[in-house]
Structure formats: C-alpha cells, structure tokens
Image (spheres, rainbow, N blue to C red):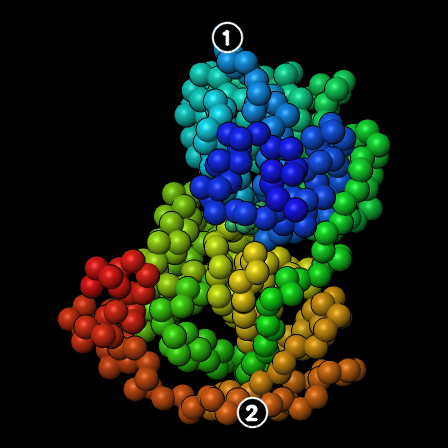
Amino acid sequence: MSFENLGLSPNILRALAEQGYDTPTPIQEAAIPLVLEGRDLLAGAQTGTGKTAAFTLPLLQRLFADAAPVSGKRRPRVLILTPTRELAAQIHENVRAYAKHLRVFATTIFGGVGMQPQIDALRRGVDILIATPGRLIDHLERRTVDVSGIEILVLDEADRMLDMGFLPQMKRVLNALPRQNRQTLLFSATFADQIKALAREFMRDPAEVQIAARNSVVATVTHRVHPVDAAKKRDLLLELLSRDSRRQTLVFGRTKHGADKLVKFLDQHGLRTAAIHGNKSQNARTRALADFKNGKITVLVATDIAARGIDIDQLPLVINFDLPMVAEDYVHRIGRTGRAGAEGLAVSLVSHDEARLLRDIRRLLKQDIAIENIIGFEPSSPLRLDGNGGGQPKQNQAARKPNHARRPHAQAPKGQHPKPHAAANKQRNWRGGRDARKA
Ligand code: AMP
C-alpha cells in the first residue's frame, strides 16, 4: 500500500515525500479511506502510531486539496480538540507540514499564554483550529471564536481528555457545533464506557478501527526493570545516564517537585537537563522541548501530564525514575520510544514500595519484563513479585561497580557546574547532537 493508492492529491503527496514518508502506517491505511468517504470514525490508536496524519491527511484532502480559493474572510471548518498544549503545538506542526503546498491557515488555541494573539489570529481568519478544551470555552464565552462553520471535528486522545476532567468542556464544545453534516473523528488509546457514551451521543454510525490491541505497546520496545532502594535511585539514574551521555533520554518522575529536584541533581553532576511539567510556563516548556529536540540538553525530566503526546522522533531511551500510579500511563510514557519501527528501550527503576505498580504494569502489558540488578545498586531485599515471571533477577554482567571516576565531572564539587574547558572529548560527550559538531 502506498499513499498514492489512498486517494490523496499530488499537492499532499508532495508534502509527504518531503517529510520522508513512503508507506502509510496501519492506522493511516485503515482510517484514511473511511474519512475520505465522509464516515464518522472511532479509532483506537495511541501516540506513535501515526494517528495525527491518519486524521489530518484525509481532512486536508476532503476540504482543501481541490478547493477553489476562498473569497472573503475564512472561518474555521475544522476543529481539532486535544488535551494538552504540547499536543496542540505538535498537531499544528504536522498540519503545517502536510498542508505545505495547500492554501490552508491553521492556528492553535491553548491556555497559559495571552488571549490577544489568539483573538487576532482568529480575527484574521483560519481554516483549521487546534484547541485545548478550557481555552476554547474561554473564547466561546467571549464570542471571539465562531464555530458555526465547523464541518469536521477531531477529538484527539479522547481518553486523556476525560482523564484530565475535560468531559463537561468537551460536551459544551460539542453542543456548540453544528450537528448537521458534521463529520466527527474520535481517536483514543482506550475505550472506556464514557467514551462509548460520548460516541453514541455525538456521532453518526461511526466506523470503528482498532490498530494496536487495547493498551498494547510498540513491539520494538524492550522493557527492563532495575530493582533499587528508593534512597539510591538518584545515583543509579546518574550511573545509567553516564553510560552514554550523548543519548537523548526522557526521564519520567511522578511529581513536579520531584522532577525539579532531579533536574537540580543531574545538573550538578554535569548533565544538561531540563524539566517539563505543569508548573512551568508555556514558554519554559516550549524552550525545554526545543532544546531537547535540537540536542542542547540530553535529559528531559517530565511528569505524565506534561509529557502526554510529546513527539520526539526516534527517542532511544525512556527511563521511569518512578513508576506511574496508573499502569496505563506506563504505556503512554513508553509510547515515546520505539516509534515508527525504531528500536527503543524502556527502563524502570523500581523500589519496594512500587512492586504492586510493577505487577499492574506486567498484567496490562501481558508480558514479562526483564528484571536486572545493577551491581552496586542491588536492593537490600528482593522485589516481591508474585505470580509468573517475577523470577530471580539477572545480574547485569556489563554493569560495573558505580565508579565515580566514570561520572562526568565527578571531580567538580557538588553544586558546581562542570567547566567548559574539560578535555575536548569529554565536552563532545556531554554536548551530543548539533553542539558536538560545533565543539
Ligand atoms: P503520531 O502517532 O501522530 O504521534 O506520529 C508518530 C510519528 O510518526 C511522528 O513523528 C510522525 O511524523 C511519524 N509518522 C507518521 N506517519 C508516518 C509514516 N507514514 N511514515 C513515517 N513516519 C510517520
């Protein structure tokens, strides 16, 4: 199957070729023809499957690919509702790329930034609106947005919007939209009863496609658990990060405060690190993500909500510093590695008090996770994992004793940043990515 066979116009195919896409992903292959037919769609697909293109490409094709130039002011014809600002920004980026050779104007509407630039953009006229629910409601209340011309509605990561308590806002938005002839596309990793109820209430005979099995994870991801006492987790993290300091690593923590403390600790040990969580301003989050993407920082510490849907191509390593409280979040976390066929590794540092969470995750994944002690960081007593697959942890032969000399800039007194005059090689190691070439 190729994109040509899916019925997309040359001006979209050209943009896809420029993105380096040659084959549709399974969700794209299944969803695109249904959306082009005008069907409502319930799609089970999580981040990393190519779902954004699965809804964006056919909606561009239906409404804009062969459209006559608009005369007069544009008003939004497409609304994409998504849970977080990061996701909204990413969808915008994708829409821009796929619509590069079309005359389509898109804008984002999300909280945490000023209203006025959004009002100005809406006033100038847009075709596609990408919004988070709360801020969209603000605009609806102030009558600064006109949704009466919406022809296609996309509910992206619907399960997450519900998790975040957006159901009332979603319903308000749905009730504000035209009902007649509206096409609704709902994407979700899971289909809890509330989502099914929403679909029954607001969709017309939706076609259903389910790509990955429920809560399944990308097959190219290897899972590994290192048991460790809670008090030694930070040092173990440092040890693991130090093994390959050029490797872009996303580290998950459970709390904002914990994430900030971790950034401080890693920073003090010479790792270029930033945090991304709900207490950070939008600007700080955007900057951290951009720095991570361009290699200025190699470690990004994130909390679950902030990281939801972060799109980073081919992230080789995700480390769970804490296990998530809800097993489903594990799936969302590691959805950031092993994408589009790339190999990924998901490492979890698990202390005693997290054994139950690990059992839940194993049950959800329906697979065992390799458990490996790291020499020098063995827990004071073994993790209690009843049932199948707990087994005795393997000893990681490759692991060496925590060797402080191997740590970057271990010589630097605590709290002091490494000096840039360190040996050129070392510097290169620590910069990685683009900076390495400049160094
Ligand atoms: P998503 O699930 O929408 O977050 O997409 C995951 C990643 O896959 C994004 O970085 C996309 O740019 C990329 N992607 C989407 N479709 C394709 C495709 N057909 N071929 C290669 N990469 C793709």
Measured from the top left, where is residue 287 in percent x and y? 36, 48
The image quarter in which residue 198 lies: top right
Front residue of 211 and 428: 211
Q: Report the residue at 46% width, 80% height from top.
A: 236
| Identity, as a three-letter code, of the amino acid under mark 2 | Gln
Mark 1 C-beta to ligand 1 under 8 Å: no
Q: How many marks?
A: 2
Instruction: Say the numbered circle drawn on residue 71.
Output: 1
Instruction: Say the numbered circle drawn on residue 395.
Output: 2
Q: Is residue 66 left or right of residue 118?
A: right
Is the residue 8 above or below the residue 425 in the image?
above
Q: Is residue 32 left or right of residue 271?
A: right
Front residue of 148 and 217: 217
Dot 1, crowdedness within 10 Å: few (<14), some or many (≥20)?
A: few
Q: Report the residue at 70% width, 77% height from top.
A: 368
The image quarter in which residue 135 lies: top right
Measured from the top left, where is residue 285 in percent x and y? 42, 48
Is the residue 400 above or below the residue 57 in the image?
below
| Viewport quadrant of the C terminus | bottom left
Front residue of 295 and 231: 295
Q: Secondary structure at mark 2?
A: strand
Q: Is residue 110 visible?
A: no
Mark 2 C-beta to ligand 1 under 8 Å: no
Is the residue 334 above or below the residue 84 in the image?
below
Q: Is residue 147 visible?
A: yes
| Identity, as a three-letter code, of the amino acid under mark 1 | Ser
Q: Report the residue at 68% width, 44% height from top.
A: 29
C-alpha span from label 1 to label 2? 69 Å
Measured from the top left, where is residue 272 in percent x and y? 33, 64
Q: Report the residue at 32% width, 61% height from top.
A: 433
Is the residue 197 above or below the residue 183 in the image?
below
